[in-house]
Amino acid sequence: MSLQIRFTLNDGLYLKDPQDSKLGKNIIQHSIILIDECGFESFTFKKLAERIGSTEASIYRYFENKHLLLIFLVNWYLEWVSYLIQINTLNLSDARLKLKVIIHSFVFASKDNPGVDYVNESKLHNIVISEGVKAYHTKEVDAENSKGFFTSYKNLATSVSNVISEINPKFEYPYALATNLFEMSNNHIYFAKHLPRLTDISVNENNVDEVEIMLNYFAEKLLS
Amino acid sequence: MSLQIRFTLNDGLYLKDPQDSKLGKNIIQHSIILIDECGFESFTFKKLAERIGSTEASIYRYFENKHLLLIFLVNWYLEWVSYLIQINTLNLSDARLKLKVIIHSFVFASKDNPGVDYVNESKLHNIVISEGVKAYHTKEVDAENSKGFFTSYKNLATSVSNVISEINPKFEYPYALATNLFEMSNNHIYFAKHLPRLTDISVNENNVDEVEIMLNYFAEKLLS
DNA sequence: CTGAAATGATAGTAATACTATCACAAAAAA
DNA sequence: TTTTTTGTGATAGTATTACTATCATTTCAG
């Protein structure tokens, strides 16, 4: 027997909760692997169906389209990061230490943790880095936002901004700093791997220490 | 007669230079309008052809596909911003003032300038804000990067990072700060418009003053 | 054991992302 | 001027994508 983590995600994202069935979990597990392999644009439900020995029609019973699946995965990741932050800051009283844990979670979300058996957190993090921004850069943002599809991100931003305000109550941009640390983390890992001239840091064999050091430096300096 | 600005963009981006012909300029002009209207995913060459009274086949003679057209447009924008920065910092000696001009250009690129008659810089800026990240978030980044498709961004990052190093030669992350100011500018304008809970600033009727103030604050604090 | 729910199998449609061919007009070269 | 080249339009066609619909079968809960 195993204690399974289960996140409550906005139920408008799916037609049937994939966390409830074998097929659903298969969809999550292998969509992560497949998107990581081929990239989001050339990922299709047909390919996914072949991969898991199912059919397109069956997958469409869970997700209306691949875009909603992407939002689902990104939200899953954000819930996972929020969860990590929560358990690792529980017994910390120093807000500066909490922010260090937060930054560590942004950068390392994949490593050092047990996780959920059907989710490869490391590959999911790669997807968030490479494809995450596509989740909310569409013509339908406003409609999707009003359905609550981005509350996971907002909640994370809020909890991080609370820590920031705890460190420096006079800092005027706690939300902007919170989201910027997250976006910057993903961006610069991506830059280091693919467009190194756009950053100063380097990531060798998935060693993202330099990113963490940079984010800590930015945060400290801004909040001093 | 008019003095037309003309940017030299990587010639691998197009099959035939659209800046050379009436149809080419029409493609640029109306693709900007159309992508701004429908968003990149539902923008198609067929719709564009109908809009300008031409045919799909004719457009394919200029661009291999809509993805390369997007990279072309983003590069055009970056060249335009670089050009603005160059002419507006020419007679400045104070590096801090230069950085202010840079930030102003990131945020306001559209307004207060004459421009090129077939390019609506304001709409182009909107496209960069909403769709820009898709230009380099694909499985083909590495291949496209090696063809030099992203040199406009790299050049901009380099020139901004030079100003940053001029302000504070000991600052360890001049490139990261340069790209972050650019990305942050676009991100937070987008957040303010569509996901306001992810930022602290607001943008009313395209008044982006608050974004500019925030970026200046971040830059000053980090470089102090 | 029975019935409902989940899945598989198959088929079909509209739109997308192209490629190919031919005809025509205008501009450039001879 | 004539001839070529070049650019554009018109039309057609193909493979793939993004779905939707229907019916049969399996699975599992009561």
Image (spheres, coloured by chain):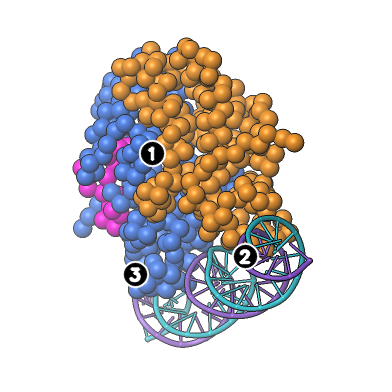
Chain colours: A blue, B orange, C cyan, D purple
Q: Position of residue B145 (x, y in %)?
A: 39, 47
Disc 2 element: helix
Callouts 2 and 3 in the same chain: no
Q: In this figure, which residue is indicated by the disc labeled 2?
A: B57
Q: Give the residues drawn in magenta, as a range.
A: A103-121
Eye-nearest disc, 2 or 1: 2
Q: Nearer the viewer, residue B41 or B122?
A: B122
User: Which amino acid, by three-letter code, is at mark 2?
Assistant: Ala
User: Which amino acid, by three-letter code, is at mark 3?
Assistant: Ile
The chain carrying label 3 is A
Name the quarter where the C terminus of chain A is drawn: top left
Eye-nearest disc, 2 or 3: 2
Q: Is residue A115 magenta?
A: yes
Q: CA distance from mark 2 to mark 1?
A: 37 Å
Residue B103 appears left or right of A30:
right
Q: Is residue B62 visible?
A: yes
Q: Nearer the viewer, residue B193 or B11?
A: B11
Q: In this figure, which residue is indicated by the disc labeled 1?
A: A187
Disc 3 element: helix
Disc 1 element: helix
What residue lies at 43% left-to-right and 56% top-to-bottom? A40
What residue lies at 21% left-to-right and 45% top-to-bottom? A205
Q: In this figure, which residue is indicated by the disc labeled 3?
A: A52
Q: CA distance from mark 2 to mark 3?
A: 38 Å
